[in-house]
Image (cartoon, helix red, strand yellow):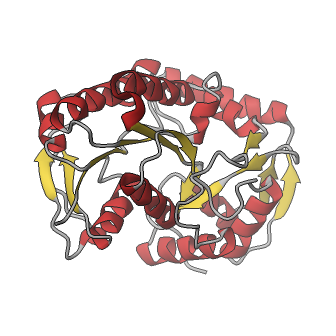
Amino acid sequence: MSRLAAVTGATGFLGRRLVATLAAEGWTVRVLCRRDPVDAAWRGLEPQVVLGDLADLAALKRLCAGADAVIHVAGVIKARTRADYEAANVEGARRLALAAGVAAPGAPVILISSLAAREPQLSDYAGTKRAGETVAAEVLGPRLTVARPPVVYGPGDWETLSLFKAATKSPVLPLLDPAARIAMIHVEDASRQVAWLAGNPSGGVVSLSDERPEGYSWRELMGEAARACGRTPALVRIPAAAARLAGLVGEARRLMGSTPMLSAGKTRALLHTDWSVPQGEGALAAPPPSIGLSEGFRQTVRWYRAAGWLEAE
């Protein structure tokens, strides 16, 4: 008999891939959406659909009813105000936990957080992801497994697109602190590891990563991005003060009502030197990652070009 996985955030970047992975592994998948979803990644799949959003407790209860596992992927990574972050990342997690506690008693709940939650003081995003973990744990206790992915990239990702656009067009790519290390994971590996956690919940907090949990230097990341785009820009270190100034400009834009990718909080996160995954913090028995950074970046660039998101060579 097929197991039932209830998934929020199913139409987001990671969520879309996760739904396909769960279905391929034999799960029946039920998703929460504001409208009937149409997604090329789900061709041939027929997920059950519950109409609603994270503000709708009744819809969340319908989503979770009878589920064998609940996976909470939904959240925001960019918002104009702290309150906007809290509405999605904290209150959304609280309501989902309450719904799962009532409608799926005993079922494991997998909360997709972020490695950023390890440093909640750096930004509103990091702080609210950590707070979301806390409120969910208060409701669910040992039923909760928190998965903290690092930077997730791959085909269909809007957030890392700017990196590849810069690698394609700019004669110079910036480098930050040479001591910094940034863990990464391809979306396919992330979805496989999350699906595994749904069937093998450990409780507590686990971090995800690719084959390099110790992370990559800025030089490695920028160099691989440039090679994936077939370019050879100069790699130039910029001082932290210049990065902070750019963050302040973005912060001013945010206060004026926009949602810039670079803000003061985002800059603090970029300047943080340790985004690695320490030994023993990962899900040790999870499926090993299959896509390294070089292959993953090349695959991502091919997809961007085929989709028209990035200019051809």
Quadrant where the C terminus lies? Answer: bottom right
Image point (62%, 32%), residue name: 118
- Disc count in the image? 0
Location of the N terminus (image quadrant)? bottom left
Q: Residue at x 44, y 72 (%)?
A: 308
Residue drawn where x is 27% and y is 42% of the image: 107
Residue 211 on image: x %, y % = 67, 65
Residue 58 shown left or right of residue 121 in the figure: left
Closer to us: 3 or 208:
3
**On the picture, is 71 further left or further right than 46?**
right
Q: Is residue 7 above or below residue 16?
A: above
In the rendered image of this protein, does residue 137 appear above or below residue 108? above
Q: Position of residue 189 (x, y in %)?
A: 51, 65
Residue farthest toward the bottom in the current orientation of the protein: 313
Residue 200: name its quadrant: bottom left
**Residue 252 placement: quadrant:** top right
Left or right side of 284 for 79: left
The residue under the point 52% across, 27% down is 130
Choose between 158 and 144: the one closer to the eye.
Answer: 144
Does residue 309 lie above or below 82 as drawn?
A: below
Looking at the picture, does residue 304 appear above or below residue 175? below
Q: Is residue 98 visible?
A: yes
**Which residue is nearer to you in this view: 228 or 166?**
228
Rendering coords of residue 139 (x, y %): 34, 23
Q: Is residue 84 visible?
A: no
Q: Position of residue 79 (x, y in %)?
A: 44, 31
